[in-house]
Image (cartoon, coloured by chain):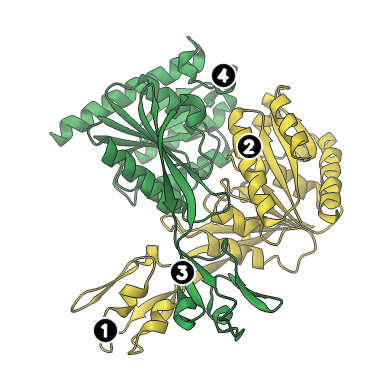
Amino acid sequence: MKLAIASGKGGTGKSMVAANLAFTLSRTEQVTLVDCDVEEPNLHLFFPAPATTTEVTVPVPVVDENTCQHCGLCGEFCQYGAITVLSDRVLFFPELCHSCGGCTLVCPNDAIHEEPKRIGTTTISTPLPNLKLISGRLDTGNPHAVPIIRAAKNLASEDPVVIHDTAPGTSCPVVETLDGCDACILVTESTPFGLHDLRLAVDVAGRLGIPAGIVINRSDGNDKATLEFCTDHDLEVMMTIPFEREIAAIQCRGDLLCRVRPEWQNAFIALYVKCSTLAGG
Amino acid sequence: MIRLAVISGKGGTGKTMITAALAQLLHGNLVLADCDVDASNLELLLSPKLIDTTPFMGMKTAVIDPAVCTQCGECESHCRFGAISRDGEVYKINPIRCEGCAVCVHICPVAIRMQPRQTGEIMYSETARGHLVHARLVPGAGNSGLLVHAVKKMAMERDRNSDLFLIDGPPGTGCPLISTISGVDMVLIITEPSVSGLHDLKRVVEVCRQFRPRIFVAINRFDLEQSLTKTIQHWCNEEGIPLIGMIPFDPQVIESVRAGSPVTQAGPSPAAQAIRKLADNLEKEMTHHDTQRG
C-alpha cells in the first residue's frame, strides 16, 4: 500500500496526518514514512532519531576547454539557457540545468562529459521499532526538488506500507510524489482558501488517476461548503479533526496527537482502513 | 519602486491574509502580484475585476508522430525523465513528465517534434488598491518558476510607475520561491510558533541570504505557543533579523477570509490592530530604504 498525503494549500495539516497515521500503524505493523516535502521537510522534528545521510547528486556537464572549439551547438541546444558559449570560453549556469544530457549528445568534438553535483540529501532513521523514516532534503538555494523526491521514494520502493508526505501546491513536486501511489488523502480546512486549493488537488489526483479521500482539519463546524463540494465530486470525508487549541499546541511543540491522546489512535486506524478500501476499489 | 515579497517557508502561516491587509494599509501607488501560482488565493480577498488574460506557454513538449515512428525505442532509452513509454504498438510521451529538453528530437528528428503547450494563464486585474497580476497554472503542470517570472515581469512592465510592488509569495524554498525573491528589495517572512515554523524559517532565511533582499520577520498566531515564540524571537535577535510584527490568534481572521475581505476591513480586532503595527513598521523601513538609495 503506497499512500500520499497532499493538500494543495500549505499548512492544512498534511504532516500532522502523516505523522499520526504512521505512528499509530507502527504499533502493529512495519511502516515507512517518506517526507517528500523536500523544500521544507518537517517529519524528522516529530521523530527525532539518529539518521544515516546519503548525498543526492545529479549529472551536470563539464566542458573540456582544450577540446572545445566554441562552436556553440551545446548552447543553442540547451532548452533551459544553462549554457552560453563565448568566443573563448563556455559559461555554465548549474541552477538552470535539468541534467537532460543533451549537450553531451550534440557536441561534435566530444568535449563535454558529465560529473555528479550534489543538490541535497536523503536520510534514513528508525525512530520507533516498526517505523522507518526517510526524509528528502533539498540544499537551500537549489531549485530542483524533483530528483530528491525521486531518490527518497526509491529508498522505500520495496517496503510494504509507505506513507508519503507531499509538498503543498499542485506542480512538479506534487506530481512526482503522487505518481505510483495507490491512493491519496487530501487534507483541507474549511475556509475559501482551503476549498479553492482542494479543488486543484482533486484535479491533480484525477489527472494522475489516483483515488482520493478527504480529511477536514481544524474544523470549527462550518464545513458546509467543503461537504457540498465532496458530495458533488463523490469524495468521501474520511475523517474530521476539530479545531482545538490543545491539538494545535501539541502539533506546535512537535509532539503527536496520538501519543499525547491515545484515544485518537482508533480514528487513525479507521482512516487507514478507508484508504485501503479506496485503493482497492 | 520598492519590491516587497511576503513569503514563509512553511505553508499556511498566513502570508495571503497578511498580504491582503498590507495592500489595504500601506501608502502610495501599489501594484500587486500573486506568485503562489500553484494555488493562488490572494484574489479571494481582493475581489479583483479582470482586465485581460494572457496565455502562458511553458516549456515546449515533445510529440511523436505514430505514422513515422518505427518503434525502435531509442527515444525512450535517452529520455532521463521517464516521459516516453511504449503503449501497445506505439511510443507515447507523457506531457506531465516531459521537461521539454528536446533530447528525443535530437535522437529522432523524423518522428518527434517539439510543440508549444499552454500550461497556464496570467490575469491582469483591477482591485481597490491597484492592479493585481495573478496566474493559474494547469494543475500538474511544471514550470511554476517560469510562470512566477512572467507574473513579476508583467507587473513591473505594466505598472512601472508604482511606488510599491507587493508580492504574495509561494511556500517552500525551491524554484517558485527563488524566482519570487530574485530581484526584490525586501522580504517579509511570516512564521508561526511551531517547531516546523521555526525549522522552515531558518531554511528560507538561508535561501534569502543567497540573494540581496533585506529580511524581516513577523510571527502569526504568536500566542498559540508562547515558549516557541520566545525561541523565534531569540533566534531572530541572534541572527540580526528585525522582528517587526506579532499577530495574535484571532477568530476574526477566519471570519474575514470567509467574508472574502482583508481582516483590517472588519473593524478593530486584535489581529487587525497587530497588522496595522506591522504595516507602520514596514513603512518606516521603506522610508529608510528610499533614503539610503538617495
Q: Is disc 3 on the same chain as disc 1?
A: no
Chain that is coloured yellow in the picture: A
- Please determine whether, in this image, residue B132 is positioned above or below residue B21: below
Q: Are marks 1 and 4 in contact (CB under 8 Å)?
A: no
Residue A65 — which label?
A: 1
Distance from Cα at disc 2 to Cα at disc 1? 51 Å
Question: Label 3: chain?
Answer: B
Residue B21 in the image: x percent, y percent? Answer: 43, 23
Residue A183 in the image: x percent, y percent? Answer: 76, 53
Residue A143 in the image: x percent, y percent? Answer: 44, 57
For mark 4, what is the residue? B259
Callout 4 crowding tier (Cα within 10 Å): few <14, some 14–19, many ≥20: some
Choose the circle earlier in sequence order: 2 or 1: 2
Three-letter code for the amino acid on which mark 2 is drawn: Thr
Residue B26 in the image: x percent, y percent? Answer: 33, 22
Say which of marks 2 and 4 sits in front.
4
Which residue is at 52% across, 79% downward? B111
Distance from Cα at disc 1 to Cα at disc 3? 31 Å
Q: Quadrant of residue B27?
A: top left
Which residue is at 60% across, 38% downward? A197
Assign the N terminus of chain B to one quadrant of the image. top left
Distance from Cα at disc 3 to Cα at disc 4? 46 Å
Distance from Cα at disc 1 to Cα at disc 4? 62 Å
- Please determine whether, in this image, residue B100 is positioned above or below residue B248: below
For mark 2, what is the residue? A12
- Please determine whether, in this image, residue A252 is positioned above or below residue A18: above
Report the front residue among B198 and B171: B171
